[in-house]
């Protein structure tokens, strides 16, 4: 990876740190491959409080251990990356333990048989395009990071872009959570052959309110938000210029 990024004329120090972060984040791919399906499995049954509590405990665990690894033991970027993987593993263990102990899996569990290998065609027709769409959406952020690395003062630009991406991810949680709930509810109603109950008018209205709230939040904290991340003057200036634009983009994200 380092050689590829250097060939693309990226800053050596930034590339070295990024490579180190990715190496220590590899285990998180394995963890998330189980966490996300389990979350969907629980949401489909209307079990959302458990998912929220597991994420809350994982966040608290992350904050406590993060202070030790980064601030006390000076593990730096490697410590942050490893801790993300450990926190998600903690969430995974919590969810699996609850499912196993409570026995909520028993009504939906069937013994392994050749029937498990059927009906995959219709599933893949939905899964593959969805996967490609999500990957393309996420890759645009990486492309923007690479472009920042080609401009003047790449360290400040990449850092500012990192703050903006984290801010957008934070605010995107609210409309994303609403979409999860709505899709689960609509799917359940359609599966129960009650299409008249699968109405989205209220959800669309709430989504619009969330979009306006996100935009107002970013516009109101244009000059202050970046101070939570850094005190560097260049990064603060770049972030304050871009935040109003990001606020307008949130209206589209919530639609």
Image (cartoon, rainbow, N blue to C red):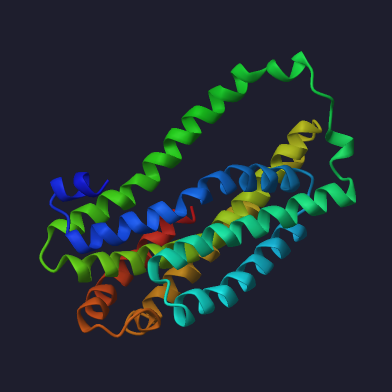
- Outermost residue on the left side: it is 152
Residue plotted at (35% across, 58% down): 20
Asked if residue 253 shows in the view, the reply is yes
Q: In front: 39, or 178? A: 39
Residue plotted at (17% across, 55% down): 10
Residue plotted at (46% across, 67% down): 79
Q: In front: 200, or 120? A: 120
Image spot of residue 230 (x, y percent):
33, 81
- Dividing the picture into quarters, in which one does residue 225 lie? bottom left
- Dividing the picture into quarters, in which one does residue 152 lie? bottom left
Q: In front: 42, or 194? A: 42
Image spot of residue 45 (x, y percent):
79, 45
Q: In front: 190, or 119? A: 119
As drawn, is 210 to the left or to the right of 199?
left
Residue plotted at (25% across, 83% down): 232
Image spot of residue 163 (x, y percent):
35, 69
Image spot of residue 174 (x, y percent):
56, 62
Q: Is residue 98 above or below residue 105?
A: below
How many numbered markers are drawn? 0
- Outermost residue on the front side: it is 73
As drawn, is 127 to the left or to the right of 184?
left
Q: Is residue 145 above or below residue 194?
A: below
As drawn, is 145 to the left or to the right of 73?
left
Asked if residue 206 shows in the view, the reply is no
- Dividing the picture into quarters, in which one does residue 183 lie? top right
As drawn, is 4 to the left or to the right of 55?
left
């Amino acid at each position: 990876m380092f050689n590829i990024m250097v060939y693309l004329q990226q800053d050596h120090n930034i590339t070295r740190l990024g490579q180190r972060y990715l190496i220590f984040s590899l285990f998180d791919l394995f963890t998330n491959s189980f966490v996300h399906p389990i979350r969907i499995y629980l949401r489909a049954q209307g079990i959302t409080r458990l998912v929220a509590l597991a994420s809350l405990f994982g966040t608290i665990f992350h904050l406590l251990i993060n202070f030790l690894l980064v601030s006390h033991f000076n593990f730096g970027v490697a410590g942050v990356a490893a801790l993300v993987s450990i926190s998600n593993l903690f969430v995974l263990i919590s969810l699996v333990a609850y499912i196993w102990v409570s026995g909520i899996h028993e009504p939906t569990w069937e013994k392994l048989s050749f029937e498990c290998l059927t009906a995959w065609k219709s599933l893949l027709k939905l899964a593959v395009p969805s996967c490609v769409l999500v990957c393309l959406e996420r890759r645009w952020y990486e492309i923007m990071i690479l472009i920042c690395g080609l401009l003047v003062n790449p360290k400040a630009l990449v850092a500012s872009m990192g703050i903006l991406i984290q801010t957008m991810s934070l605010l995107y949680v609210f409309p994303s959570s609403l979409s999860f709930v709505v899709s689960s509810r609509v799917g359940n109603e359609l599966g129960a052959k009650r299409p008249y109950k699968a109405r989205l008018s209220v959800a669309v209205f709430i989504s619009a309110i969330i979009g306006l709230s996100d935009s107002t939040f970013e516009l109101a904290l244009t000059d202050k938000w970046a101070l939570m991340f850094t005190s560097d003057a260049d990064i603060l200036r770049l972030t304050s210029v871009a935040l109003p634009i990001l606020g307008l983009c949130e209206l589209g994200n919530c639609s």
